[in-house]
Amino acid sequence: MDRIYLDNNATTLVDPLVKEAMEPFFTQMYGNPNSLHSFGTEVHPYMRIAMDRLYSGINAPDEDDILINSCATEGNNTVLKSVYFDYIRNTPKKRIITTEVEHPAVTNTCKFLGSSGAEIVYLPVNSDGIVTLDILKEHLDPDKTALVSIMKANNETGLIFPVKEMSLYCREQGVLFHTDAVQAIGKIKVDVRDTPVDFLTFSAHKFHGPKGVGGLYVRNGIKLTPLLHGGEQMSGKRGGTINVASLIGMGLAMELAVDNLDFENTKIRQLRDRLEDAVMGIKDTEVIGRREIRTPNTILVSFKGIEGEAFLWDLNRNGIAASTGSACASESLEANPSLMAMGVDKELAHTGIRFSLSRYTTDEEIDFTIEVITKTVERLRSISSTYA
């Protein structure tokens, strides 16, 4: 069997239709869209179509902004640092509330802002691995809090956070709310009319679009200091020439991702559950988080007594790609942060393996993966007991 890719929370295959749509903008319609000549202006209709697809994909009103940038990391930095400059630096509201299980793009930016005078509060997760509205209420003081930043879905566990309830509460309290929706788009419905966030970030490469392009949704009327100062691109809110080909690709990828939500929540969920059921049949194995509150493609599983790196090595030898968690923290040998935050036993926290499927995952691939996992656990535990 060819190689099997089960690390789709790290990045995804570019949909062939997306690749085809992008190609003319590399060597045919390659003009700078800010130019006044025909090479620049001829790309404008295609850019408008792409932007319409993005707005439709998250159900954003026309009066709100979607800023095109390089990735969700840039979007997260833009939100957090803008809030610091615009709402924290010279006001009594010094607090940013986030969670213990955010992506490094949020947590590391918060650490930086903490060293610059912001007060950072990290909310704990409950036994289910999520932050609830009640937990947020315990820590939110509207007189001290400028921003709450809580992910829509966790990149390691796939657990879905109650962002709608929390954003509604923050709106009532006069506190800005940001959600990192990177792991949500293309897996569950994302609707900024139904869920009144002030900021939302996403990256195209998480939903079968190209790498190096993303979006930042900003609700109308919210002040935003640019992270990148330059020209008047994006109405002066993000300097730099637009990556036209990637914008075209991201727009189509968003449309296809939304069109495939039913497939994701039926067929892909079915494949995920079959893999999960097989894994749960292995002794001393634990899947993290209830499947009904996870994205339909994600499993984080801990095999007791087996180091995650050793397990991944065996999977890779058999042509299967998985991970121990966030790709942006893959060089660290620390225990899985989501597991540690949930209070999982430290030994188990060092053995977490994430399997993340996509709409291109097949029945045959899951069958083979189950076979390999079963043999790998048996072999590694046998080695471990020999040297115990």
Image: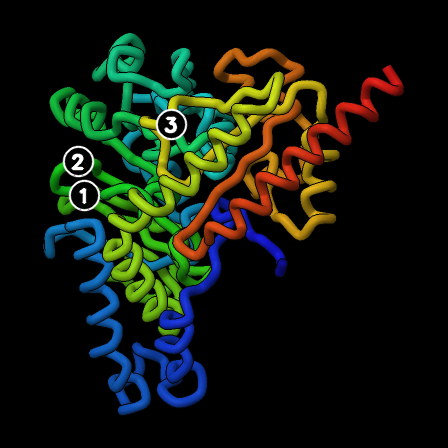
Q: Is residue 3 left or right of residue 365?
A: right
Sequence order check, earlier mark of 3 and 2 = 2
Q: From the viewer's perspective, is residue 372 above or below residue 162? A: below
At 48% from the left and 15% from the top, the residue drawn is 342
Secondary structure beneath disc 1?
loop
Asked if labels 1 and 2 touch by Cβ distance under 8 angstroms, the answer is yes
Q: Which mark is residue 191?
A: 1
Q: Residues within 10 Å of mark 3 (few under 14, many from 20)?
A: some
Q: Which amino acid lies under the numbered mark 3 shown in the image of this protein?
A: Arg
Residue matched to label 3: 291
Secondary structure beneath disc 2?
loop
* Image quadrant in which you'd find residue 386: top right
Q: Where does residue 65 sit, x and y in percent of width and height?
A: 20, 53
Front in this rendered view, residue 51 or 4: 4
Q: Is label 1 or label 3 in front?
A: 3
Q: Is residue 297 left or right of residue 234?
A: right
Sequence order check, earlier mark of 1 and 3 = 1
Q: Where does residue 208 sit, x and y in percent of width and height?
A: 41, 59
Separation of residues labelled 3 and 2 (CA atoms): 23 Å
